[in-house]
Image: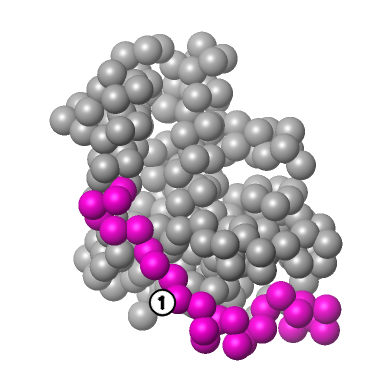
């Protein structure tokens, strides 16, 4: 480890409790989000989604571009 | 059990099979659903992924009915996660935000990148899966404690991870 990596201190890792999001929280948040798009989870279709995204330019490039703009 | 951290660049690969490294992500998520691996990401990855989809819509690369299908699929996938499942989302806790600040000047990465990196470490992950040239160029110069950076854009590193995970 680099000597300047004070951020990674073992004591923080041992004492910090991570409260992962529950299924109820995530389901509620996603249901609320989908209302904005006038859709719901019954329309979920992974194959169809992959087919749609196959014809777009790379999601990865889009993410990199977005992050570059924010940096 | 191996615990892997998915940067947003890894999360979105599950939905886009044409991306470099999406085959490996498929294998990893399948193994996780079978209970052999643990995947962790930050809830911030959900927002970043959402923003990426929104940009595609604004650029008219996807239509209104298409974004409805994508969002329904995305939402359904995320909602299937939980605090006890093998794909977990960590919260943006104040301690994570405050402790990650040190990485901004130490590693010269953005606050977003620092949040992901610190979450990876504090959640006991052994691998940080990422496909982002900027963050990788900064991270690869350094040795991190407890976890390895895996560049999903690099075939050798993908092969290495596959071997390590026995995929």
Res. A49 visible in picture: no
Res. B37 visible in picture: yes
Residue A56 versus residue B109: which sits nearer the camera? B109
Whether A59 is drawn above or below A4: the answer is: above
At a point 26% along the width and 42% down the height, the residue shown is A28
At a point 34% along the width and 71% down the height, the residue shown is B37
Give x and y (percent) for residue B62.
Answer: 44, 16
**Quadrant in the picture for residue B152:** bottom right
Whether A71 is drawn above or below B158: the answer is: above
Give x and y (percent) for residue A66.
Answer: 65, 33
Colouring scheme, one of rainbow, by chain, secondary structure, one colour: one colour
Whether A8 is drawn above or below A11: the answer is: above
Whether B153 is drawn above or below B4: the answer is: above
At a point 77% along the width and 71% down the height, the residue shown is B142
Residue A9 lies within the magenta run: yes
Does dot 1 land on a helix, a strand or a loop?
loop
Q: Which chain carries label 1?
A: B
| Quadrant position of the C terminus of chain A in the picture | top right
**Quadrant in the picture for residue B17:** top left
Q: Residue furthest front?
A: B94
Q: Mark 1 points at which residue?
A: B2
Give x and y (percent) for residue B127.
Answer: 53, 70
Give x and y (percent) for residue B93.
Answer: 52, 61
**Mark count:** 1
Residue B142 lies within the magenta run: no
Q: Which residue lies furthest to the left in this view?
A: A42
- Magenta stretch mostly in which secondary structure? loop
**What residue range appears in magenta?**
A1-26
């Amino acid at each position: 480890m680099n000597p300047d990596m004070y951020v990674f201190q073992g004591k923080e890792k041992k004492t910090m409790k991570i409260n992962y999001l529950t299924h109820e929280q995530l389901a509620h948040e996603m249901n609320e989000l989908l209302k904005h798009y006038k859709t719901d989870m019954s329309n979920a279709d992974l194959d169809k989604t992959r087919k749609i995204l196959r014809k777009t330019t790379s999601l990865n490039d889009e993410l990199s571009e977005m992050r570059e703009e924010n940096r | 059990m191996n615990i892997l951290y998915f940067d947003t660049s890894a999360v979105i690969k599950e939905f886009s099979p044409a991306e470099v490294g999406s085959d490996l992500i498929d294998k990893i998520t399948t193994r996780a659903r079978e209970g052999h691996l643990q995947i962790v990401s930050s809830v911030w990855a959900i927002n970043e992924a959402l923003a990426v989809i929104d940009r595609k819509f604004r650029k008219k690369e996807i239509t209104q009915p298409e974004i409805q299908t994508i969002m329904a699929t995305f939402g359904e996938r995320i909602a299937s996660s939980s605090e006890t499942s093998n794909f977990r989302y960590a919260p943006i806790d104040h301690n994570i935000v405050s402790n990650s600040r040190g990485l901004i000047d130490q590693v010269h990465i953005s606050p977003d990148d620092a949040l992901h990196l610190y979450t990876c470490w504090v959640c006991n992950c052994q691998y940080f899966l990422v496909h982002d040239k900027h963050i990788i160029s900064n991270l690869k110069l350094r040795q991190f404690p407890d976890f390895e950076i895996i560049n999903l854009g690099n075939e050798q590193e993908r092969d290495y991870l596959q071997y390590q995970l026995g995929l």
